[in-house]
Amino acid sequence: MNKTLKTIGIIALILTAGGLAVPKLLESRLAAPADYTQKTETGGPVEAKYMGKGGHEVSVYQEPALQGFSRYTICYPSDLETTDGTYPVIVLCNGSGTPVSKYLSVPEHFASWGFIVIGTEEAYDWNGFGAEMCIRHLQKLNDNERIGENENRFYQKVDFEKVGIVGHSQGGVGVFNAITEQRHGDLYKAAVSLSPTNKKLAHDLEWDYDAAQIDTPVLLLSGAGGGDDWVVTGEQLEEIYNDVSGSKVMLRRKDTPHGEMLYAANGYVTAWFMYWLQADREAGKAFWGDAPEIAANPLYQDPKIRLAE
């Protein structure tokens, strides 16, 4: 009985953290501050560079969807509309009750580094369904010169050979299931799971996942200190890390609450995608070599690295 009540209490905390059980006054509160890239402390030159704005101006496109998540939001480099060529992709998996509209500054940041970034208003993304539909929608946009009566700016602009995926909390679970359970999981060439729900809690919530099936290069990040990241402790994150069979990195940001992990480590999230999807060797210095930056960054702890070209 006590174990059951404890699980119910944790579920209530997750829903509260995701914005589903907060007073009306807080419903419009952003999950990621608009200025987080300027105000988040960094601890190394690579992290600082990729926490900053990239070289592209950013535009935002939204389209209604006949799905429970109501619409797609795409942030993209503005020059996509006037240049030839294709752009790499980042797909977003939302945390509990946290639609992309509550953290738009995150995909805008990624887009400034040259990515097409797509997300939804999905509130329960543990199964990766929203991510799967994002891929299908991008395929539609890439294949059709016009959508209805309108010229389509994304026509033949999507590089499906360079697709990444990132999610926080419940969305971190969604990352795993999008790769292992959804039709287009083999498209993902790089993944980031931010404070993913630990395996025991995910099982209790019926959000099961199997990280042992993943050979996509994956970056695992969580908070540490100040009571630990209550959704995934260091020991639990290491358990997930040990399950992953392919290239992988694990890192915990000190004194960072669970909710802030949505954006606080995005210097390294951006660097991860820049390395794997844009072959940016400068970004790779965060993770590769005899002295990777993450191993010496004073803002982080417990780095673990196993990488293969």
Image (tube, helix red, strand yellow):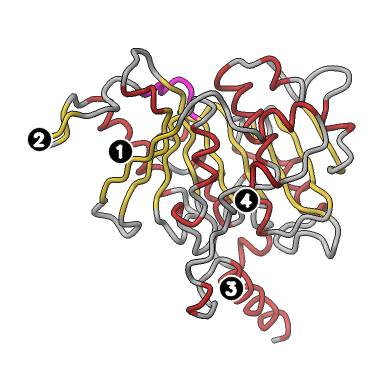
Q: Which mark is residue 286?
A: none
- The residue lying at 62 percent from left, 39 percent from top is 192
Q: Amino acid at mark 3?
A: Thr
Judging by the rendered image, the residue that carries numbered circle 3 is 16
- Residue on which the image places disc 2: 149
Q: Which residue is mark 4?
A: 262
Q: Nearer the viewer, mark 1 or mark 4?
A: 4
Tell me which amino acid carries mark 2. Answer: Glu
Marks 4 and 2, how far apart in space?
Answer: 37 Å
Give the class, few, some or many, for how many residues have Cα within 10 Å of label 3's Cα (few <14, many ≥20): some
**For residue 109, which quarter of the picture?**
top right
Tell me where residue 263 appears, x and y as whole percent: 64, 47
Of marks 1 and 4, which one's residue comes earlier in the chain?
1
Tag 1's secondary structure? Answer: helix
Label 4 and label 3: CA atoms lie apart by 16 Å
Q: Earlier in the sequence, mark 4 or mark 3?
A: 3
Earlier-in-chain disc, 2 versus 1: 1
Identify the amino acid type marked 4.
Answer: Leu
Q: CA distance from mark 1 to mark 4?
A: 24 Å
Q: Which residues are magenta?
A: 158-163
Q: Quadrant of the C terminus?
A: top right
Residue, disc 1: 137
Instruction: Tell me what residue is drawn at x 81 percent, y 52 percent.
Output: 234
Q: Around disc 2, counting alpha carbons within 10 Å, would you say few (fewer than 14), some (14 to 19), or many (20 or more)?
A: few
Residue 163 point in image, percent of width and height: 48, 28
